[in-house]
Every structure is written in C-alpha cells, then in structure tokens.
Amino acid sequence: MRLNQRLALSFDWLWLLALLLLSATGIAAIWSTTQGTSLSYYVGRQLIYLAVAFLAFLVLLYFDYHLYTDYIAFAYLIGMAVLTLVLVAGHTVHANKSWLKMGTVNFQPSELMKILVILGLAKYYADSDRDHLETSELVVGGLIVLAPMLLVILQGDLGTAVTFLPIYAGLSFLGGLKRKHMVVLLVACALAAPAAWMMLKEHQRDRIESVLNPSSDPRGVGYQPQQSKIAIGSGQFLGKGWKQGTQGQLGFLPARHTDFIFAVLSEEHGFLGSSLLLGLFLYISLRLLRAAREAKDKIGSMIVMGVLSVFVFHALVNVGMNLGMLPIAGIPLPFVSAGGSSLLSHFAAMGLCMNINMRRFVN
Amino acid sequence: MVKLQLESNRQPIQRRLNWLYPPMIVIFALLGARLWWLQILQGAEYSRLAERNRMRSIPVAAARGPILDRDRRPLVDNRPSLNIVLYRELMKDLDATTAYVARSLAVLPDQLAAQLRRNRRAGSYQPIVIKEDVGIEDVSVVEAHQMEHPEIQLSPEPRRRYRYGNLAAHVLGYLGEISEDELARSAFPGVQGGELVGRSGVERTYNQYLVGRNGSREVLVDSLGRELGMVAETDAAIGGDLQLTIDYDLQVQAESLLAGKVGTAIAMDPRTGEILAMASSPSFSPKSFSPRISAREYNEITGNPDRPLQNRAVQNAYPPGSIFKLVMAYAGLVEGYVDEDTHVICRGSELYYDRVFHCWYASGHGDINLEGAITYSCNIFFYTLGQRLGIDRIAARAHELGFGTVTNIDLPSERTGVMPSQEWKRRAKKQNWYAGETISVSIGQGSVQATPMQVLRAVSAIVTDGKLVTPHLLLQAENAPKPEWPATQLPIRKEDASRIRAGMWASVNNSGTGIEAAIPGLDICGKTGTVQLIGSERMKEIAADDAAEFANHAWFAGFASRDNPEIAVVVFLEHGGGGGAAAAPLAKELFRAYFEKKTQAAKKAQAADRSGGVR
C-alpha cells in the first residue's frame, strides 16, 4: 500500500488531462460532423471505445512494466499468429484486409501489434550493455520490426505498415548507431525509395505527385487535399463555430470524422483552435521525451522512445496530410480520429509510458 | 554504487534524447507556420473558395420578346421547354458520364465531345446544354439518376414558337448559340456564353431589343451538387416586343403566290419605306434550327441548291432588265436630255458603235416618246437616250436612286449590287469602258445588278416625286425609342415624275407590257422586265432539259394608285420567264389583297360609324 501511495504521488495528472482533452476534442468534432447523418451513432460508439481504451490504460499502468517485458517474446509470437490469422480469415474494409471481426466489433490487430513490437525491440536492445548497437543487433532488431510489417503490407494496409518504421528508427537511434551503420541505413533508404515507388499502386503514386503539384487535377486525386486546405484556410482566425463549418457539414471534406478530422477542427475553431490542438500534441511529445530521459532503466527509456516515435509520426503525417504538405495516407490523428483500435492502442501505449514515468524512483 | 554504474550506463541515452528537442520544436513550428499561412495569410482566399463550393448560381434564361405584325398579331412568341445540361464541375468521371448519356439519353459521344469542345473556354461552373427541348421520358431519366449523376440536370429555357411555321422566315430569322468568336469580339454586348442570339433576320438586327434580362437562383448545395435550399432569387425578365411593319395578311398572300417558284416579292409603302410584305422562295422552317446541336438539318438546308436560307429580296443581286428603263427615264429627265418634244423612231433595230442592237419588238414601235417607250418597253428609245447621256451620267443618277449601295434596310447581310461606270470598270476590272456597253446598260443588261429591294426602293422614289426612303421592317420596338428612318428628296420635277407614272399606268391599263397586272377600277401602274441570260440564238441550241437553267428572269415593279402611290410592289422570279407573263399576275394578286383588305376595313369602320349614329 505504501508503494502504491508513492506511485500515485509521482503520477503526472497533467499528462493524463492532456490525453483526455484530446479525446474530448475528438468526440466533439465527431459529434459536429456526424450529427444528423447516418453516422450519428459514431459519437456513442467513440465514447464506448474511450471507456474500453481507458480501462486498458489503467491495466497497463497498474502492473510493473517489467512484468510485460518478461513475457514479451511469448506475446510477440501470439501477435504474429493473430496477424497471420487476419491475413487468412480477415475482414475487408476499403480494400484493406486488416480487420478482425469479433461479434459486431471490427478490430485492427495491427494497431496493437505496434505495442508488442515496441516492447520486443526495447527488450532486445536494452539487454545489450554497450553504448552502440552491433551489426547483428541491428539486423535482428530490423527483423523484429519487418516481420509483422510485412504481414500488414500483405493485408494491403500500407499506411499502418509504414508506422512500424519509426519504431525501428527511434529505438536504433537511442540504442546508438555507429557512423558506418548510419551511412548504411541512409544508403539503404535511398536505394529502397525507388523500389518502394515501384511497389506503390497507381493511386498511391498519384497521391504523392499531387502533393508536389496540388493544382494538377483538382477534381481527381487533388480533390481531397484541396478541399482540406479550403476547410482549414476558410477557418481563418476564430473559425466558423462548432457545427458551422460548411466544408465539413456539406460533405466537401472526405473522411471528415477520421483522417481529416484535423481539417474539421481547423475550419470550425480557426487558427486559435488548431494551434491549441497542435500545442497539445507538442506538450505530450515533450512530456514523453522527458519521461524517456527520466526512466529509471534503459528498457524504460527504450519503451517510451518507441511510443514517442509512433505518436509523433502519426501526428506529423496526419496533420501534414491535412495541411496539404504530405501525401494522403490512411493514418488517423492519435486520440482524436474516430476509431476504436487506434484509440485503444494509443491509450495502452501511453499507459505503458506513464507506468514507466511513475516508477522512475522505484527500485 | 549500483546507482552510479547505472547513471554512467545511461549517459549516452540521455545525450541522444537531448538531441531530439530542437528537431521536434522545429517540426511543430513548421506545422504552425503552415497553419498561419493557410488560415491567416490565405484565409480570405480560402473563405472565398469555400463560399464558391457551397453556393451555386443557377442561371434562369429569360424569354426573348415576341415579334408582332403591324396590327400587333404575334408571329413569334415563346413556349416553355426543358434542356438537359451538364455541370462540368460536378463531373467526376467523363467516361462514366459519356456512357450514361449515350445509353439513357441518346446523346452520342461525338455530340457530347463537340459540345464540350465548343465550351472548353467557358468556366466549369457554367452549364452546357447537351440535349434540347426534351420530352417526359428524358425528364424522368434525369430525375431518376440524380444521385449517381448529379452533373446531369434539367434546365428550363423558354423556346421560340413560330405561330405560322415558315411564314416570313427570312424576315424573322432563326436563333443560334453565340460562338466563341462572337464572344471574343463582343459582337453581342451583354450576351454570355451558351446563350442564344439571332442568327439572321430581325432576330439578329434587333437582338439587343429582343433579349430579356436573365435571372438567377443562388442555391446552397452539398458536395454532390444537391440543392439544400435557395438563398436568393432574381426573376428573369422577358425581352421587349418588336412590332414589325409586316402585314400578316399580305405576307400570307405573297408567300402563297411564290409557292413552288424561286424568287421574291416585296410590298412597301413608298411614302414611308414600311415593308408590308417580304417573301422569298424557297423558304425554310426557323423552328427546325436546333439552336445548338443538330448539324444534320442545317447541312440539309444549306446543301439545297436553291439556297432556301438566302433572302432573295436583299441578299442576291440580279440584272434589273427593262425595269432599269425607269432609271434611264429619271436620268434623262433630270439631266434635261428628255422633254415633251423628245421623240425616237424605232425601226426594230439600230446601229450603235458599229454593232446592231435590237428592240424586243422586231417590227419596231415607230415614232415613240418617253411615255410610250415606258408603256411598250421600247429598247431603241432607251438605247438612244443612253448613248446621249453616256455611262457616267447614267451611273451618277442611278447611284442617286440607290443602285450600287445598300438600302440600309434593317436586315443583315444586304448586298450592294453593281452600278457600272468608267471608274468602276477601271477599278474592278482594270479595263477601259467600251461605249457599246452603255447601250446594254441602258436596258438593264450588261454589268448592272441590283437587289429586288434596291429596285423597289428606286421605283418608289421615282413615282413619289423623288422621295427616296429607307426601307424598314421595324415599326416600333418596346425597348427602343421610336425609330427614325432617313429619307432624301431627289431632284425630279413633279411633272416629270407624273410623265413616268403615266407611262407605267399605260403599261398596265392601255395594252402595254404590264397588262397582266391590271385590275379594273384600280389605277395600278407598273413596269415589266425580262432578263435574257443568253442570246436568243444560243438559246435555240441548248437542249430542252437544260433550258430552265438559262431561262429568263422575270421582273415586275409597280405601284398603286397612279395619283396617290400608297403601295409599291416588286416581284422577281429567278428563271421565271417573261416579266409580263410570269411576274405581273403575281403583283396583281398582291395589289388585290392589299386593296380588298383596305375596302373591308373602310366598310367596317363605316358600319361602326353607322351603328354608332343610330344609337
């Protein structure tokens, strides 16, 4: 009991408040765009998701994080098995066979797999007590990330698959890269880029090209980024008001409750609202960075670093896509976009980090 | 001790984490800067785009003003109709749209492509008409597919209704969509792309008075183009009406007289220049001109060798033949080369400049004066007069009467005709004038060419003691001030004009060439003309089959009454035969129709007076 009291004292309530604020903002925006449409049930569903995600958050917070890392090899293998199962018996949504149907709920196991990959890679790298990673460690670490990533690519969900990469990049950076390794990795990236380009489907290449030349085809592939920019820009300083955004309300914005929810918020709450939202993301990112520095052991830092990488990557790619700076990829805005799997995995990941953070003084 | 070791072990990790602060801040700052750019610096522009997204201005086409005859009987008015239009900005996939309109609306891919090409420079928010005046089947197809194909919509447009089919087609004219070229050089001020304009006739001349003011509906739409509600509406205003000088009854008569013939008939009030009837045959149906799409019927009409679109009254010039003798008489009198004592002996032929010229009457008219020469159309009299006057005096006086220049009638594409002179020949043909040509010109042959309208105008001027009017079709336009039609007084003395009238009276009423135009009790006066296209010797050589092609043109120009000219008429029949035999009887019927209507109106007025008096 004494222990739990100490833990509660070092718990960062402000951090939790920031997460709940983001979730509340998301629900308000989902409400705004779906009320009065056939999607009006989204608000209630998102509230249920939030409750479930918060429960997972509490569970992951409660037990000492070393408990999870001790069994990670086993969990990782189960995760791989589930991903394979999805590939065989998965449920297809928008050409992505990445969903698992459980009763009436569709679930995306690839989202949760990211946490297992973070834990697995953190454990593997942290077991080494050298300052720098060896070549063999980098290769094995790469395989830990690439194996599930490949399965997700096979499911057809390239957007989610790409989000595995920052885990490898972030943890390898933290583990210590020798100069030669850094060069090799950069060269590998440069060589992989054209190959990846060839692997992309026609519409995916178009999306990338439309970022470079937004006015090329405003009715076709350039439509979504253009409408998103119009939504954000027309919000001006104060915004049009909650439920008053014409771009979102009249359907000019695509995927307005999921991928383009940032544009909805920017349209309705203006520069004031959108920069506050951006500020929340920055605050959480900096808070994660501090937690990584303050973690009591290497594995703690590693885990927080992995979560930070995924979180920042998600936020940057999603906001960048909304602002017309990055190509369209089906990557949701953490804590804000409608969707249960994303909310669950991000809350779970944050639970891990706050777990590590509050146990920073405990030996 | 353990803790110390741990610390040292973790030092590089903390260092690396510290490195992450600056890039993180920079990246978020970049996103913030982009937000500032979009929302603050470009905010107004994006607000405008958002407005344009959700507001759509739907044009409401205004009806053109009706066209009425001189008694305000409508000749053309409007009826409601629906067009199928394509909104390109709502089109997601051209191939899908093309397939849909081909399958369900029978709009061929070629037609659609042609319409798109024609409007490629118009803004993508402007609707493009892809099928006109559709029936109930097409309407239900479009309405049933609104969800899948919001880009295809119905658009109401008032359409011209020609009350009497082909009647007065050349006068009224037809409509067509304004071309890119006309838009570019603003040939029709205020007219937008896709709108209809007059292509010929008074529809074209008075387009600006006839067009109404288009209205618009500002509607709120969603991203699928579905209307959510109306924000503002401006009603379309119909164009002003156009009251013509045309008399419906006389026009009907003129057209029925020309049925099956190739030619033209015009009736005009010689005192004012008001055109009472103007018929040109063959004619066309202005209704059949689909203003925008169907090229088939247009090609059919333009491919006809008899050229039904041509208004022969003003758009073609012919040798005036013996009608020109009236111009010669005018020139002789005004120049002082002819007086009461002028006599010529006609022996049937005469030698001029070493060449024999014939009178049409081989036995000769004998001793003949001006009146007789007009009555019997004696060539020798006018050859002699022409020789004395010389071509330049003839040309100057003919120019005075309007030969060689447009009459300025209010119809498009009027021809000028040709009035030859020495200077004209030097300029146009780079040759010197041969004196012998003057002899041919004296009887309206040779290079002289005039439109039937020019002939009627000149004859009217001569018989109204020299009042040269501007012929016109507009009596009054609702949207315009009362039009002024300039008239010129020509230098002919009253007694001289009366001598020409006497000759023309005798031509009709005293066994002259115009006897076929006579109506007992009416002092109809006239002059016939027969234009030989080839010499009579060569005519004999030509096979009977081809003879029609070289048959004479028939002319008749006349007026009534002798002492009070109130109606002047010209009848011209292309390859119609002799003027006296073919053209004069038609003119007679026009005079009859005119005066019958006049007496009936007078009787009616009298009856009304009487009944009013009894009461």
Image (spheres, rainbow, N blue to C red):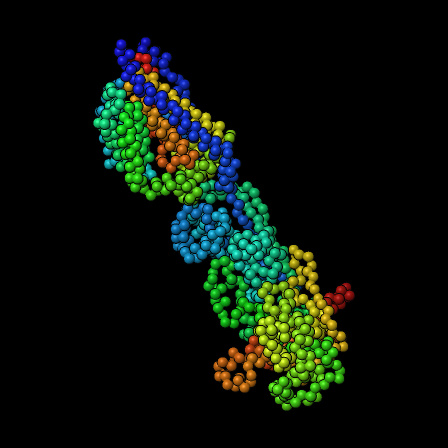
Which residue is more in the foreground, A20 or B28? Answer: B28
Q: Quadrant of residue B381?
A: bottom right
Q: Is residue B381 left or right of residue A232?
A: right
Vertical relation: A342 (above or below) B393: above
x then y, percent, for residue B328: 68, 78
x then y, percent, for residue A38: 41, 36
Q: Is residue A26 left or right of residue B592?
A: left
Q: Is residue B475 left or right of residue A103?
A: right
Residue shown at 63%/71% (left/top)?
B404
Which residue is more in the foreground, B461 or B18? Answer: B18
Residue shown at 25%/29% (left/top)?
A142
Residue shown at 24%/23% (left/top)?
A124
Quarter in which the C terminus of chain A is drawn: top left
Quarter in which the N terminus of chain A is drawn: top left
x then y, percent, for residue A300: 30, 19
Tell me if I can see residue B302 in this picture: yes
Q: Is residue B179 left or right of residue B209?
A: left
Vertical relation: A182 (above or below) B423: above
Residue shown at 33%/29% (left/top)?
A341
x then y, percent, for residue B354: 61, 86
Which residue is more in the foreground, A313 or B439? Answer: B439
